Image: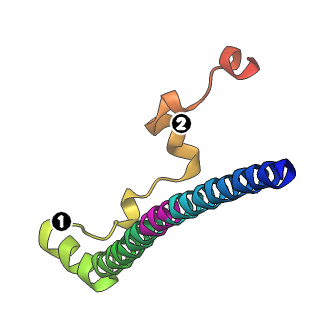
Protein backbone atom coordinates (compact mmCIF):
# COMPACT_ATOMS: atom_id res chain seq x y z
CA UNK A 1 0.00 0.00 0.00
CA UNK A 2 2.92 2.31 0.44
CA UNK A 3 3.60 2.16 -3.30
CA UNK A 4 0.11 3.43 -4.08
CA UNK A 5 0.49 6.21 -1.54
CA UNK A 6 3.88 7.14 -3.03
CA UNK A 7 2.42 6.83 -6.53
CA UNK A 8 -0.40 9.15 -5.52
CA UNK A 9 2.10 11.70 -4.27
CA UNK A 10 3.96 11.58 -7.57
CA UNK A 11 0.70 11.92 -9.51
CA UNK A 12 -0.36 14.77 -7.27
CA UNK A 13 3.00 16.49 -7.88
CA UNK A 14 2.63 15.95 -11.64
CA UNK A 15 -0.89 17.38 -11.54
CA UNK A 16 0.32 20.44 -9.65
CA UNK A 17 3.24 20.89 -12.07
CA UNK A 18 0.84 20.55 -15.03
CA UNK A 19 -1.52 23.15 -13.55
CA UNK A 20 1.40 25.51 -12.92
CA UNK A 21 2.67 25.00 -16.49
CA UNK A 22 -0.84 25.55 -17.86
CA UNK A 23 -1.22 28.73 -15.81
CA UNK A 24 2.17 29.93 -16.98
CA UNK A 25 1.25 29.26 -20.62
CA UNK A 26 -2.08 31.07 -20.24
CA UNK A 27 -0.31 34.06 -18.70
CA UNK A 28 2.34 34.03 -21.44
CA UNK A 29 -0.33 33.91 -24.20
CA UNK A 30 -2.19 36.80 -22.55
CA UNK A 31 0.97 38.91 -22.35
CA UNK A 32 1.87 38.06 -25.97
CA UNK A 33 -1.61 39.03 -27.19
CA UNK A 34 -1.50 42.28 -25.22
CA UNK A 35 1.90 43.11 -26.72
CA UNK A 36 0.57 42.25 -30.17
CA UNK A 37 -2.40 44.56 -29.66
CA UNK A 38 -0.03 47.37 -28.65
CA UNK A 39 2.06 46.74 -31.76
CA UNK A 40 -1.06 46.75 -33.97
CA UNK A 41 -2.12 50.07 -32.44
CA UNK A 42 1.33 51.53 -33.07
CA UNK A 43 1.24 50.27 -36.67
CA UNK A 44 -2.22 51.81 -37.21
CA UNK A 45 -0.95 55.10 -35.81
CA UNK A 46 2.07 55.05 -38.15
CA UNK A 47 -0.13 54.19 -41.13
CA UNK A 48 -2.41 57.12 -40.29
CA UNK A 49 0.60 59.41 -40.01
CA UNK A 50 1.95 58.15 -43.36
CA UNK A 51 -1.42 58.75 -45.04
CA UNK A 52 -1.59 62.30 -43.61
CA UNK A 53 1.97 63.01 -44.76
CA UNK A 54 1.14 61.73 -48.25
CA UNK A 55 -1.93 64.01 -48.35
CA UNK A 56 0.24 66.94 -47.26
CA UNK A 57 2.79 66.13 -49.99
CA UNK A 58 0.05 66.01 -52.64
CA UNK A 59 -1.35 69.32 -51.39
CA UNK A 60 2.09 70.97 -51.45
CA UNK A 61 2.78 69.67 -54.96
CA UNK A 62 -0.55 71.04 -56.17
CA UNK A 63 0.20 74.40 -54.54
CA UNK A 64 3.69 74.48 -56.10
CA UNK A 65 2.22 73.66 -59.52
CA UNK A 66 -0.24 76.53 -59.12
CA UNK A 67 2.44 78.97 -57.96
CA UNK A 68 4.78 78.02 -60.83
CA UNK A 69 2.25 78.51 -63.63
CA UNK A 70 3.95 80.56 -66.37
CA UNK A 71 0.88 82.77 -66.92
CA UNK A 72 0.72 83.60 -63.21
CA UNK A 73 4.43 84.36 -63.05
CA UNK A 74 4.21 86.55 -66.16
CA UNK A 75 1.34 88.51 -64.61
CA UNK A 76 3.41 89.07 -61.44
CA UNK A 77 6.43 90.18 -63.47
CA UNK A 78 4.29 92.59 -65.48
CA UNK A 79 2.66 93.98 -62.32
CA UNK A 80 5.76 94.40 -60.15
CA UNK A 81 8.78 94.77 -62.43
CA UNK A 82 9.40 97.26 -65.15
CA UNK A 83 11.45 94.97 -67.35
CA UNK A 84 12.21 96.07 -70.88
CA UNK A 85 13.79 94.13 -73.72
CA UNK A 86 17.56 94.54 -73.90
CA UNK A 87 18.62 97.02 -76.56
CA UNK A 88 21.13 95.62 -79.03
CA UNK A 89 23.49 98.46 -78.21
CA UNK A 90 23.54 97.41 -74.57
CA UNK A 91 24.96 94.02 -75.37
CA UNK A 92 28.70 93.56 -74.93
CA UNK A 93 30.91 91.50 -77.17
CA UNK A 94 33.44 89.08 -75.65
CA UNK A 95 36.33 91.35 -76.68
CA UNK A 96 35.19 94.25 -74.46
CA UNK A 97 34.49 92.18 -71.35
CA UNK A 98 37.98 92.72 -69.84
CA UNK A 99 37.44 96.48 -70.18
CA UNK A 100 33.99 96.35 -68.60
CA UNK A 101 34.99 93.98 -65.81
CA UNK A 102 38.79 93.98 -65.38
CA UNK A 103 38.75 91.91 -62.18
CA UNK A 104 37.25 88.95 -64.05
CA UNK A 105 40.66 87.94 -65.42
CA UNK A 106 42.60 85.65 -63.07
CA UNK A 107 46.09 86.80 -62.21
CA UNK A 108 48.93 84.51 -63.39
CA UNK A 109 50.09 83.76 -59.82
CA UNK A 110 46.60 82.70 -58.74
CA UNK A 111 46.05 80.64 -61.89
CA UNK A 112 49.25 78.64 -61.28
CA UNK A 113 48.17 77.62 -57.79
Which residue lies most toward the right here?
A: 3
Res 87 → quadrant: bottom left
Image: 50 above or below 16 = below
Of residue 13 and residue 51, the one placed in the foreground of this image is 13
- The answer for how far apart the CA atoms under marks 1 and 2 are is 30 Å
Which residue lies most toward the front here?
A: 1
Percent coordinates x, y for residue 33 in the rendering: 52, 66
Percent coordinates x, y for residue 55 in the rendering: 36, 78
Callout 2 crowding tier (Cα within 10 Å): few <14, some 14–19, many ≥20: few
Of residue 46 and residue 77, the one placed in the foreground of this image is 46
Residue 81's label in the rendered image is: 1
Q: Which residue is mark 2?
A: 98
Q: Is residue 85 left or right of residue 81?
A: right
Q: Is residue 44 magenta?
A: no
Which residue lies most toward the left here?
A: 79
Of residue 77 and residue 48, the one placed in the foreground of this image is 48
Which residue lies most toward the bottom here?
A: 71
Of residue 13 and residue 7, the one placed in the foreground of this image is 7
Q: Residue at x 44, y 62 (%)?
A: 38
Percent coordinates x, y for residue 83 in the rendering: 23, 67
Q: Is residue 37 magenta?
A: yes
Image: 43 above or below 112 = below
Amino acid sequence: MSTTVGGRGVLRALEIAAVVCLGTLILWVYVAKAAGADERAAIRELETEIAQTQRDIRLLRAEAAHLEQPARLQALVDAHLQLQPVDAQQEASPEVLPVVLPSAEPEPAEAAQ
